Amino acid sequence: MRLLAAAALLVAALVLVAGSPAARLRNLTRPAPATAPRTRWASRMLVPGLLVAVVSGGVLVGGGAGAVLAYALGAPVVTGVLVWRRHAGRADATRTAVAVDEACRQLAGLLRLGHVPSAALRVAAADSPLLAEVVAVQQVGGEVAPVLGRLGSRPGASGLAELAAAWRVAERTGASLGATLDALSERLAAAGAVRDVVSAELAAPRATGRLLAALPVAGLLLGYGLGGDPVAFLTSSPVGQACLAVGVTLGCAGVFWTERIADDGDG
């Protein structure tokens, strides 16, 4: 009975976090806004919410001991998933920044060859999917700068926001866009070189943080090697359960702290 109640609680948590089918269908047919605070909040709370559901299931199945054991097993998994998501987001932002750099360099080269900005934009969009939406708006008579500014709000695409400002100034004043794009391309290339160096320098601290997080497992193995039974102590006695919960919390916090320091250095 307790196991069925725990499973029902987990399913209910998944349904509540995912939303109703009608809401998901509306989200599929609705254009995504540039910023979606509620969506970002729901995405960030999904994995911790599952951890709460798992711990609650542990309470129903095994009481306090079950909750501690569920937390000890679930917290590292949640930490790993969240860290992986941060890395995936950072990698996506890096790829976007590289694509923006290449698009701006191609636009600058086309302008130097004598293309007008609208024609250069269409040619560059053939090789850069980032500019496809901009060209689509341009072909129906819309303004280019607002679309570039909206796309530039995404992580790693700040160069498009600068391109939007330059495009707006060129449209209003008739100033040449070529010199501005040359300067923007040089700045984005320099920023990309710095980003690569910083990322390489921070790879070792990140790896060290993960290694330190795995050391408690080595401690458990060492305890068995010395003839003890650390798992039985950590799961059967109140003092051991408290040590297990505190140790897992500190280990996960250390991983997040290391990642936060590395992200500050990367930013």
Image: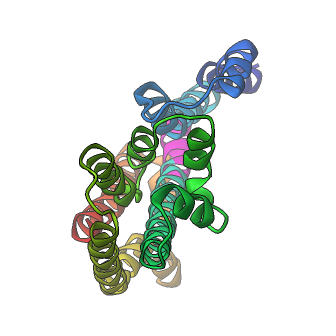
Residue at the image position 51 percent from the left and 49 percent from the top: 78
The color scheme shown is rainbow
The magenta stretch spans residue 124: no
**Quarter location, residue 2:** top right
Image: 90 above or below 50: below
Query: Horizontal placement of 95 versus 9: left or right?
Result: left
x and y percentages locating residue 97 in the rendered image: 43, 66
Image: 46 above or below 210: above
Check the picture and name the quadrant holding the C terminus: bottom left
Residue at the image position 29 percent from the left and 63 percent from the top: 176
The answer to whether residue 228 is seen in the rendering is no
Residue at the image position 58 percent from the left and 39 percent from the top: 137
x and y percentages locating residue 194 in the rendered image: 28, 81
Depth check: 182 or 149 in front? 182
Depth check: 177 or 210 in front? 177
Query: Horizontal placement of 77 versus 136: left or right?
Result: left
Q: Which residues are magenta?
A: 65-74
Check the picture and name the quadrant holding the N terminus: top right
Depth check: 166 or 21 in front? 166
The magenta stretch spans residue 69: yes
The answer to whether residue 251 is seen in the rendering is yes
x and y percentages locating residue 103 in the rendered image: 50, 68
Residue at the image position 26 percent from the left and 49 percent from the top: 169
Image: 155 above or below 204: above
Depth check: 145 or 11 in front? 145
**Quarter location, residue 248:** bottom left
Q: How many marks?
A: 0
Query: Horizontal placement of 224 versus 249: left or right?
Result: right
x and y percentages locating residue 261 in the rendered image: 23, 65
Q: Main secondary structure of the magenta part?
A: helix
Image: 69 above or below 96: above
